[in-house]
Image (cartoon, rainbow, N blue to C red):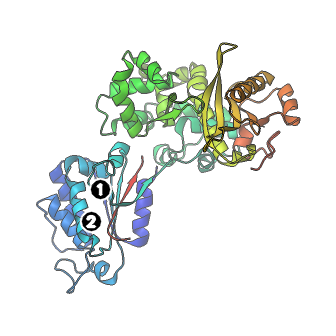
Amino acid sequence: MGKTYLLRALVEELGGFYFGATAGTEAESLRQFSAALADHVRSPVPFSFATWDDAVSYLFGLAAPEKEGVAPGREGVGSHATSGAPFLVVIDEFPYLAKVAPELPSLIQREIDRFQVERSHMRLLLCGSAMSVMGGLLASTAPLRGRAQLELVVRPFGYRAAADFWGVAAEPALAARLHAVLGGTPAYRRQFLADDVPASLGDFGDWICRTVLSPFSPLFREARYLLAEEADIRDTALYHSVLAAVAQGNTTRGGIAGYIGRKAVDISHPLNVLEDSHLLAREADIFRAGKSQYRITEPLINFYEAVMRPSWARLESGQAAEVWAGSAERFAAQVAGPYFEGMCREYVLGPGRSLLRTSLGEVGGGVVSDPKARQQIQVDVAVVEQGSGGSRPMVALLGEAKWGTVMGVNHLERLRRARDLLTGRGMDTEDCRLACFSAAGFSDALRSEAEQGGVALVGLEELYGAGGELHGAGGEPHGAGTDAAAGR
């Protein structure tokens, strides 16, 4: 996501000490840290700390207030202490160190507490890619809990920013497909693909075959590496099965358990680990309390589980073109479709607020049961402001999203039926707007309804800000501390 890029730029701008940890034994890691610290303070001889306790004590000592000059061995760097300027320390990939030296968080906590009274000038940033490890640094009874002044997750670009970054914003159909596969991870364009960008929508298939589906591309095994780098994931086969279940459309706990052949109670641990790793997200049904569905948060992993993993042997043998040619239906149903629904909800949270006649409430999706017709109506995009103080919950928006279907009046009628059912359940739907989101377009009859103000139509052009006004939209639119920056 660019964490290291940002941290290196920060150290370059402000000065300070940067250390990027690598996977290694405790002794090797301590030796590397000692060498980097000696180089930073311009010591004429290398340091040789016997323990991490000694190393951490020395590091914090560089920012300790001085009472009588500069301590021995600190010539050239004592200005942090004597001038009052903050001493910036960045430890990148901290989980590598915490794995081989579990005492490190406690040692850091001790030094923070020791210098809190003496107003240390230390500014410590801990960074890592393993989300579960970084999140655990500040959780429950962890030593660093309560000591952090900032917890920052470096997130991927949103779909609009990603389109600008890839230079495809002028072609929304291409931008949407690109984002459905790779998401908003900046490194995938430059470091992984050396700026290989599809030239047009017509080039997208060839681009997929020469990049993501090619065994010679760095992206080919990236989805596997993303899973393997999480420290709490050991039985990767089980976790891949859970992710495959979700990618195949089994998004409830019971559906996932049935797909992998386990009881629902037996998959609590892998589900929790995947959530802690930010690879799965549990989304509550906005209309039914206690009901929820799981969604894969990393687009590349979803693409891998839906398209690549079922044909892995063929892809390894170089049959990318054949595999992709036979994956159109799976790509639309299991990759692009779910992604498009999420993109529409993201749109409502941002520029799409103009769809609402009221203030923005909770944005999500859910199911509305129709007992009379003995069916369930799936609402892909909904905005509900939960009632409080005796007031009724208010429904501000009901929307349906279709990736490969030209939407017609039948989709609008389903939304109207859902609105009537919610009214019958006691929810306030007086200001409820209806919206149809489609990447494939709308029928003439539905466009006529939109012209009369019966529904808002949102296509890819509108989602990417290239389509002008929405059809039928209307509406209004200090001290010693440790900063834990976590993210992939």
Q: Residue at 43%, 22% (x, y): give it.
A: 312
Q: How many marks?
A: 2
- Position of 94 relative to 38 (above/below): above
Q: Is residue 442 left or right of residue 123?
A: right
Q: Is residue 51 left or right of residue 223?
A: left
Mark 1, Cα crowd under 10 Å, few <14 / some 14-19 / many 20+, is: many
The residue under label 2 is which amino acid type? Answer: Ile
The residue under label 1 is which amino acid type? Answer: Leu
**Residue 17: in sight, yes or no?**
yes
Q: Is residue 291 left or right of residue 404?
A: left
Mark 2, Cα crowd under 10 Å, few <14 / some 14-19 / many 20+, is: many
- Position of 355 relative to 274 (above/below): below
Disc 1 to disc 2: CB gap under 8 Å:
yes
List x then y, in percent, for residue 429: 73, 35
List x then y, in percent, for residue 352: 70, 45
The extreme left residue here reads 50
List x then y, in percent, for residue 14: 41, 72
List x then y, in percent, for residue 219: 45, 37
- Position of 99 relative to 47 (above/below): above
Residue nearest the observer in this picture, 197 or 453: 453
Residue nearest the observer in this picture, 185 or 372: 372
Label 1 element class: loop
Res 112 label: 2
- What residue is pinned by disc 1? 144
Spatial CA distance of label 1 from label 2 is 9 Å
